[in-house]
């Protein structure tokens, strides 16, 4: 089992950057694939990025490709999401999620068993 806690959200102007972190408890963090999702008011939760257990595979939603970078440090039990060139449409509550071993359908929220409480990102125009 793993517990996840997000941090790093905030208010930023369009074109700015934020770095979100997902801190995990437990000694088996390296056994979990991690995904980032976001949910804006009135919208469904959507996939943002995914990283495999060792970090060798990463995937991104088309809407963030080239602007966001996901990375992990298993020694520190953290996954980071570097977000550059932020746009107002990136405004949402961002969640990290964990799946033991791997997520075949990494873009599907239903693949993940463990979720953090979320961190709010607001991008002003």
Image: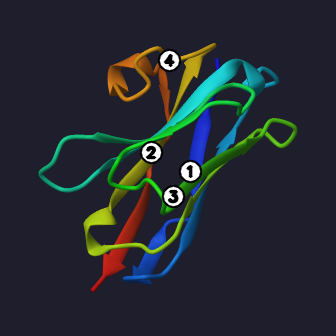
Which residue carries the number 3 mark?
Answer: 68
Mark nearer the viewer, 4 or 2:
4
Q: Quadrant of the N terminus?
A: top right
Decide if residue 56 is on the left or right side of residue 38: right
Q: Quadrant of the C terminus?
A: bottom left
> First in sequence: mark 1 or mark 3?
1
Decide if residue 55 is on the left or right side of residue 97: right
Which residue carries the number 2 mark?
Answer: 95
> Which residue is found at the position 82% from the left and 24% from the top?
27
> Which residue is found at the position 46% from the left and 14% from the top?
104
Which residue carries the number 4 mark?
Answer: 103
Marks 2 and 1, how far apart in space? 7 Å
Badge 2 vs badge 1, beta-carbon distance below 8 Å: yes
Decide if residue 117 is on the left or right side of residue 76: left
Q: On the image, which quarter does residue 93 sit in?
A: bottom left
Marks 4 and 1, how far apart in space? 20 Å
> First in sequence: mark 4 or mark 1?
1
Q: Nearer the viewer, residue 111 or 62?
A: 62
Mark nearer the viewer, 3 or 4:
3
For label 1, count other residues whose C-alpha is less than 10 Å away and answer few (under 14), some (14-19) or many (20+): many
Please say if 64 is above or below 29: below
Residue 6: assigned label = 1
């Amino acid at each position: 089992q793993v517990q996840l806690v997000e941090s790093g959200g905030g208010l930023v102007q369009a074109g700015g950057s934020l770095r979100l972190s997902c801190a995990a408890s437990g000694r088996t963090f390296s056994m979990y694939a991690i995904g980032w999702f976001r949910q804006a008011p009135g919208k469904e939760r959507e996939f943002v990025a995914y990283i495999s257990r060792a970090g060798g595979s990463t995937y991104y939603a088309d809407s963030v490709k080239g602007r966001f970078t996901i990375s992990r440090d298993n020694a520190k039990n953290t996954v980071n999401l570097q977000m550059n060139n932020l746009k107002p449409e990136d405004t949402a509550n961002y969640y990290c999620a964990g799946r033991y071993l791997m997520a075949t359908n990494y873009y599907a929220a239903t693949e993940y068993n463990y979720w953090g409480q979320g961190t709010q990102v607001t991008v002003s125009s």
